[in-house]
Image (cartoon, grey):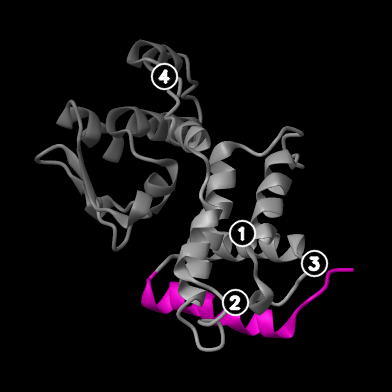
Amino acid sequence: MRKFNEENERIKRRYLQYLKRARRKDASTVQKAAEGILRFEASTNYADFKRFHIEQVNKFQDRINAEISKATGKPLSKSTIRTILNANKGFFLWLADQSGYKSRIRHSDADYFNMDAKGQRVASTVRETPYPSMEMTRHAFNFMPEVTEADKRNKAIFAFLMLTGARDGAVASLRLKHMNMIDGCVYQDAREVRTKNSKSITTFCPSSNGLRQMAF
Protein backbone atom coordinates (compact mmCIF):
# COMPACT_ATOMS: atom_id res chain seq x y z
CA MET A 1 0.00 0.00 0.00
CA ARG A 2 1.37 3.42 -0.97
CA LYS A 3 2.50 5.60 1.93
CA PHE A 4 2.15 9.35 2.38
CA ASN A 5 3.96 11.99 4.35
CA GLU A 6 1.47 14.74 5.15
CA GLU A 7 4.07 17.49 5.46
CA ASN A 8 5.67 16.43 2.17
CA GLU A 9 2.29 16.51 0.47
CA ARG A 10 1.65 20.04 1.64
CA ILE A 11 4.99 21.41 0.46
CA LYS A 12 4.72 19.55 -2.87
CA ARG A 13 1.30 21.06 -3.43
CA ARG A 14 2.73 24.53 -2.84
CA TYR A 15 5.54 23.86 -5.31
CA LEU A 16 3.23 22.54 -8.01
CA GLN A 17 1.01 25.59 -7.56
CA TYR A 18 4.15 27.73 -7.92
CA LEU A 19 4.99 26.00 -11.21
CA LYS A 20 1.47 26.46 -12.49
CA ARG A 21 0.69 30.00 -11.30
CA ALA A 22 4.05 31.74 -11.05
CA ARG A 23 6.14 29.92 -13.64
CA ARG A 24 3.11 29.49 -15.96
CA LYS A 25 3.95 25.89 -16.78
CA ASP A 26 1.38 23.82 -18.64
CA ALA A 27 -0.45 20.90 -17.05
CA SER A 28 1.73 18.21 -18.64
CA THR A 29 4.93 19.85 -17.32
CA VAL A 30 3.47 20.14 -13.81
CA GLN A 31 2.40 16.50 -13.94
CA LYS A 32 5.88 15.35 -14.96
CA ALA A 33 7.38 17.36 -12.11
CA ALA A 34 4.97 15.73 -9.65
CA GLU A 35 5.79 12.25 -10.94
CA GLY A 36 9.54 12.86 -10.80
CA ILE A 37 9.40 14.16 -7.22
CA LEU A 38 7.21 11.24 -6.17
CA ARG A 39 9.80 8.80 -7.53
CA PHE A 40 12.46 10.35 -5.33
CA GLU A 41 10.15 10.47 -2.32
CA ALA A 42 9.28 6.78 -2.75
CA SER A 43 12.99 5.88 -2.92
CA THR A 44 13.45 7.40 0.56
CA ASN A 45 10.41 5.52 1.89
CA TYR A 46 8.58 8.86 2.06
CA ALA A 47 11.01 10.40 4.54
CA ASP A 48 10.37 14.03 5.45
CA PHE A 49 12.12 16.36 3.00
CA LYS A 50 13.57 18.14 6.03
CA ARG A 51 15.64 15.00 6.63
CA PHE A 52 17.21 15.28 3.19
CA HIS A 53 20.81 14.20 2.79
CA ILE A 54 23.07 13.71 -0.22
CA GLU A 55 23.27 9.94 0.13
CA GLN A 56 19.55 9.75 -0.66
CA VAL A 57 20.28 11.28 -4.07
CA ASN A 58 23.16 8.89 -4.75
CA LYS A 59 20.93 5.89 -4.03
CA PHE A 60 18.13 7.41 -6.09
CA GLN A 61 20.43 7.87 -9.09
CA ASP A 62 21.55 4.23 -8.82
CA ARG A 63 17.93 3.14 -8.58
CA ILE A 64 16.61 4.92 -11.66
CA ASN A 65 19.70 3.99 -13.70
CA ALA A 66 18.90 0.34 -13.00
CA GLU A 67 15.12 0.66 -13.37
CA ILE A 68 13.33 -1.22 -16.13
CA SER A 69 10.51 0.51 -17.97
CA LYS A 70 7.20 -1.34 -17.68
CA ALA A 71 6.22 -0.10 -21.13
CA THR A 72 9.32 -1.19 -23.06
CA GLY A 73 10.92 -3.82 -20.82
CA LYS A 74 14.20 -1.94 -21.23
CA PRO A 75 16.18 0.39 -18.94
CA LEU A 76 14.85 3.93 -18.70
CA SER A 77 16.15 6.15 -21.49
CA LYS A 78 18.69 8.83 -20.64
CA SER A 79 16.22 11.53 -21.64
CA THR A 80 13.63 10.10 -19.21
CA ILE A 81 16.21 9.96 -16.43
CA ARG A 82 17.22 13.55 -17.14
CA THR A 83 13.57 14.65 -16.92
CA ILE A 84 13.17 12.92 -13.55
CA LEU A 85 16.38 14.39 -12.15
CA ASN A 86 15.61 17.89 -13.43
CA ALA A 87 12.19 17.75 -11.80
CA ASN A 88 13.82 17.09 -8.44
CA LYS A 89 16.61 19.60 -8.98
CA GLY A 90 14.08 22.37 -9.61
CA PHE A 91 12.07 21.30 -6.57
CA PHE A 92 15.03 21.31 -4.18
CA LEU A 93 16.30 24.65 -5.49
CA TRP A 94 12.89 26.08 -4.65
CA LEU A 95 12.73 24.19 -1.35
CA ALA A 96 16.02 25.73 -0.18
CA ASP A 97 14.27 29.12 -0.07
CA GLN A 98 11.21 27.99 1.87
CA SER A 99 10.63 28.61 5.55
CA GLY A 100 11.43 25.53 7.62
CA TYR A 101 13.78 24.15 4.96
CA LYS A 102 16.38 26.91 4.57
CA SER A 103 18.49 25.64 7.46
CA ARG A 104 18.36 22.03 6.24
CA ILE A 105 18.75 22.28 2.45
CA ARG A 106 21.27 24.37 0.53
CA HIS A 107 21.00 25.44 -3.09
CA SER A 108 24.15 23.48 -3.88
CA ASP A 109 22.43 20.27 -2.68
CA ALA A 110 20.28 20.40 -5.81
CA ASP A 111 23.41 19.94 -7.95
CA TYR A 112 23.59 16.30 -6.84
CA PHE A 113 20.60 15.66 -9.10
CA ASN A 114 22.76 16.44 -12.16
CA MET A 115 23.51 13.66 -14.64
CA ASP A 116 27.07 12.76 -15.49
CA ALA A 117 28.52 14.39 -18.62
CA LYS A 118 28.21 11.22 -20.69
CA GLY A 119 24.56 10.76 -19.76
CA GLN A 120 23.86 14.39 -20.61
CA ARG A 121 25.34 13.96 -24.08
CA VAL A 122 23.31 10.82 -24.72
CA ALA A 123 20.11 12.46 -23.43
CA SER A 124 20.68 15.48 -25.66
CA THR A 125 21.37 13.47 -28.81
CA VAL A 126 18.88 14.27 -31.53
CA ARG A 127 17.97 11.17 -33.49
CA GLU A 128 16.89 11.52 -37.07
CA THR A 129 13.28 10.51 -37.56
CA PRO A 130 12.63 8.61 -40.77
CA TYR A 131 9.91 10.13 -42.89
CA PRO A 132 8.47 9.39 -46.34
CA SER A 133 9.64 11.39 -49.34
CA MET A 134 7.20 13.47 -51.38
CA GLU A 135 7.39 10.83 -54.10
CA MET A 136 6.31 8.17 -51.61
CA THR A 137 3.44 10.26 -50.25
CA ARG A 138 2.30 11.15 -53.77
CA HIS A 139 2.29 7.44 -54.65
CA ALA A 140 0.16 6.68 -51.58
CA PHE A 141 -2.15 9.59 -52.39
CA ASN A 142 -2.70 8.39 -55.96
CA PHE A 143 -3.74 4.94 -54.75
CA MET A 144 -6.17 6.16 -52.08
CA PRO A 145 -9.80 5.32 -52.91
CA GLU A 146 -12.18 8.18 -53.69
CA VAL A 147 -15.54 6.47 -54.14
CA THR A 148 -17.48 7.59 -51.05
CA GLU A 149 -17.69 10.99 -49.39
CA ALA A 150 -15.57 9.63 -46.56
CA ASP A 151 -12.92 8.51 -49.08
CA LYS A 152 -12.80 11.98 -50.60
CA ARG A 153 -12.56 13.57 -47.15
CA ASN A 154 -9.69 11.27 -46.16
CA LYS A 155 -7.87 12.01 -49.39
CA ALA A 156 -8.31 15.77 -48.90
CA ILE A 157 -6.95 15.57 -45.35
CA PHE A 158 -3.98 13.51 -46.55
CA ALA A 159 -3.26 16.08 -49.27
CA PHE A 160 -3.54 18.88 -46.72
CA LEU A 161 -0.96 17.19 -44.49
CA MET A 162 1.34 16.72 -47.49
CA LEU A 163 1.11 20.36 -48.55
CA THR A 164 1.37 22.02 -45.14
CA GLY A 165 3.34 19.61 -42.94
CA ALA A 166 1.03 20.61 -40.08
CA ARG A 167 0.77 18.41 -36.98
CA ASP A 168 -2.30 16.21 -36.67
CA GLY A 169 -3.46 17.99 -33.50
CA ALA A 170 -3.20 21.34 -35.25
CA VAL A 171 -5.09 20.12 -38.31
CA ALA A 172 -7.91 18.74 -36.15
CA SER A 173 -8.42 22.18 -34.59
CA LEU A 174 -8.17 24.27 -37.79
CA ARG A 175 -11.13 26.18 -39.21
CA LEU A 176 -11.78 27.43 -42.74
CA LYS A 177 -11.03 30.98 -41.59
CA HIS A 178 -7.41 29.93 -41.01
CA MET A 179 -6.92 29.23 -44.72
CA ASN A 180 -5.97 32.11 -47.01
CA MET A 181 -7.01 31.16 -50.54
CA ILE A 182 -5.48 34.25 -52.13
CA ASP A 183 -1.95 33.88 -50.76
CA GLY A 184 -2.13 30.10 -50.61
CA CYS A 185 -1.26 29.76 -46.93
CA VAL A 186 -2.61 28.42 -43.67
CA TYR A 187 -2.35 30.53 -40.53
CA GLN A 188 -2.14 28.32 -37.47
CA ASP A 189 -3.28 30.83 -34.85
CA ALA A 190 -2.07 29.58 -31.46
CA ARG A 191 -5.06 31.25 -29.79
CA GLU A 192 -7.37 28.80 -31.53
CA VAL A 193 -5.19 26.05 -33.03
CA ARG A 194 -3.41 23.37 -31.02
CA THR A 195 0.12 24.08 -32.23
CA LYS A 196 3.35 22.80 -30.70
CA ASN A 197 4.47 24.95 -27.76
CA SER A 198 1.48 27.23 -28.50
CA LYS A 199 3.31 29.05 -31.28
CA SER A 200 1.50 30.68 -34.18
CA ILE A 201 2.70 29.31 -37.53
CA THR A 202 2.08 30.38 -41.11
CA THR A 203 2.50 27.62 -43.68
CA PHE A 204 2.65 28.46 -47.38
CA CYS A 205 1.49 25.73 -49.75
CA PRO A 206 3.52 25.00 -52.91
CA SER A 207 0.41 25.72 -54.94
CA SER A 208 -2.56 27.84 -53.93
CA ASN A 209 -4.62 25.81 -56.40
CA GLY A 210 -4.08 22.72 -54.29
CA LEU A 211 -5.31 24.54 -51.19
CA ARG A 212 -8.31 25.91 -53.06
CA GLN A 213 -9.24 22.48 -54.39
CA MET A 214 -9.15 20.94 -50.90
CA ALA A 215 -11.37 23.67 -49.46
CA PHE A 216 -14.00 23.08 -52.10
Q: Which sits earlier in the primary sequence, circle 1 or circle 2?
A: 2
The outermost residue toward the bottom is 99
Front label number (4 vs 2): 2
Location of the C terminus by quadrant is top left
* Place of residue 122 in the rendered image (x, y in percent of width and height, measured from the top left): 50, 31
The residue beneath circle 4 is 141
Using a 10 Å C-alpha cutoff, classify the residue at mark 3 as few (fewer than 14 neighbours), some (14 to 19) or many (20 or more): few
Classify 11 as above or below 163: below
The residue beneath circle 2 is 12
The residue beneath circle 1 is 36
Answer whether residue 10 is magenta in the image: yes
Using a 10 Å C-alpha cutoff, classify the residue at mark 4 as few (fewer than 14 neighbours), some (14 to 19) or many (20 or more): some
Answer whether residue 153 is magenta in the image: no
Classify 64 as above or below 122: below
Q: CA distance from mark 3 to mark 1?
A: 15 Å
Find numbered disc 2 in the image and state the secondary structure of the residue it sits on: helix
Front label number (3 vs 2): 3
Q: CA distance from mark 3 to mark 2?
A: 16 Å
Per the picture, the main secondary structure of the magenta-coloured stretch is helix
* Place of residue 71 in the rendered image (x, y in percent of width and height, measured from the top left): 73, 40
Number of the label disc, if any, that sits on residue 45: 3
